[in-house]
Image (spheres, rainbow, N blue to C red):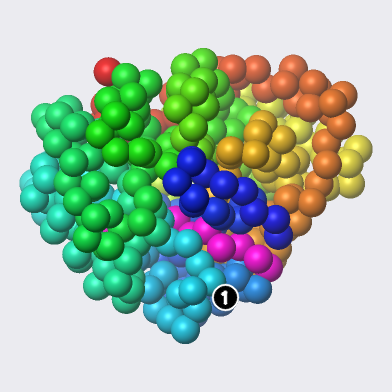
Amino acid sequence: MKTRTLGTQGLTVSDLGLGCMGLTNYAYGKADEQESIAVIHRAIELGVTFFDTAEVYGPFTSEQLVGRAIQGRRDRVVIATKFGFDISGSVRWGLNSKPEHVRKVCDESLKRLGTDYIDLFYQHRVDPAVPIEETVGAMAELVQQGKVRYLGLSEASPNTIRRAHAVHPISALQSEYSLWERGSEAQVLPTVRELGIGFVPYSPIGRGFLTGQIKRFEDFAEDDYRRSDPRFQGENFNLNLKLVDRVKQIAQEKNASPSQIALSWLLHQGNDIAPIPGTKRIAYLEENAAAAEIELSREMLDQLNQIAPVGVASGDRYSEKMMNTIDQS
């Protein structure tokens, strides 16, 4: 697999990464540990170097699994992890980006990952109670200490991105971006490109919707996060299935899967974009990795842009509580 550079500080990653959130029993139903480790090992064999996790996934279990999987392979991978949630607090999804908390989480993440440095350390969500300058200042200290190599933000607004970047260069901005979630195109993408910051789309296959495999809401396990996702509810579900049907038509013309078309479309949006699709199955991993080799004609890209304009997906992308954690400043 080819590589691309995120930011101007030298962070080089594979065209496609691997989102590791679902590799443990978190968000998307049960996962088998040995199979999940096998997925990471196979990804490395395929040339995937970019692995994305976070302390909140589990919590902690995703980082622990990634740490076990990369033993003996550390020099072949780029590990990204995140801080920013107050996991020990009484309020679920409470935020904490105080400098002392940033330092504490970094040390704990290093232990769970079994490494002495983190390649890319993200603020998972912007904490409105802590000036971004203070948070990034603490992150910059970690770079100076050699514990972290590059800095990132997740779901940050243009104003926050600019303020953070003025304290220390930001290498990557992570946000949801896909054929059915294109809100970043209005202001966030232009901002990061102006500043020379790379863009990492999470949920690039629409939380699995754009695979074309999801047919009924009732098929989700009881512990599957998507049961509470507005885009998978009621009439939203039915309307979004129609979008997927149109992507499937284009995929058939290309002799590809809908998910491959969705990933290829993202890769065609610029060499500063590195999507991180997640999967618990080797077969889907191999299918996703093959998307990096798919070329889309200008005509095909135009067709995809027409069937998936900004805001086409029906329903909010998160529940109201989760949307409140998205930086709008």
Q: Nearer the viewer, residue 281 or 121?
A: 121
In magenta stretch: residue 47? yes
Rendered-image quadrant of the C terminus: top left
Q: Residue furthest bottom?
A: 72
Q: Position of residue 326 (x, y in %)?
A: 31, 28
Q: Nearer the viewer, residue 260 or 242?
A: 260
Mark 1 crowdedness (10 Å alpha carbons): few <14, some 14-19, many ≥20:
some
In the figure, 306 relative to 11: above or below?
above
Residue 63 visible in rendering: yes
Q: Is residue 223 left or right of residue 251?
A: left
Tell me the residue at 45%/46% (across/down): 9
For mark 1, what is the residue?
Answer: 41
Tell me the residue at 19%/64% (across/down): 107
Q: Secondary structure at mark 1?
A: helix
Tell me the residue at 36%/43% (across/down): 152
From the image, give the main secondary structure of the stretch colored magenta: loop
In the figure, 106 relative to 265: above or below?
below
Q: Nearer the viewer, residue 243 or 12?
A: 12
Q: Position of residue 284 (x, y in %)?
A: 67, 60
Magenta region, residue range: 46-55
In the figure, 249 relative to 188: above or below?
below
The image quarter in which residue 71 lies: bottom left
Q: Position of residue 97 (x, y in %)?
A: 16, 42
Rendered-image quadrant of the N terminus: bottom right
Q: Is residue 240 left or right of residue 62?
A: right
Residue 176 visible in rendering: no
Q: Amino acid at mark 1?
A: His
Tell me the residue at 24%/47% (across/down): 140
Q: Is residue 242 left or right of residue 198?
A: right
In magenta stretch: residue 95? no
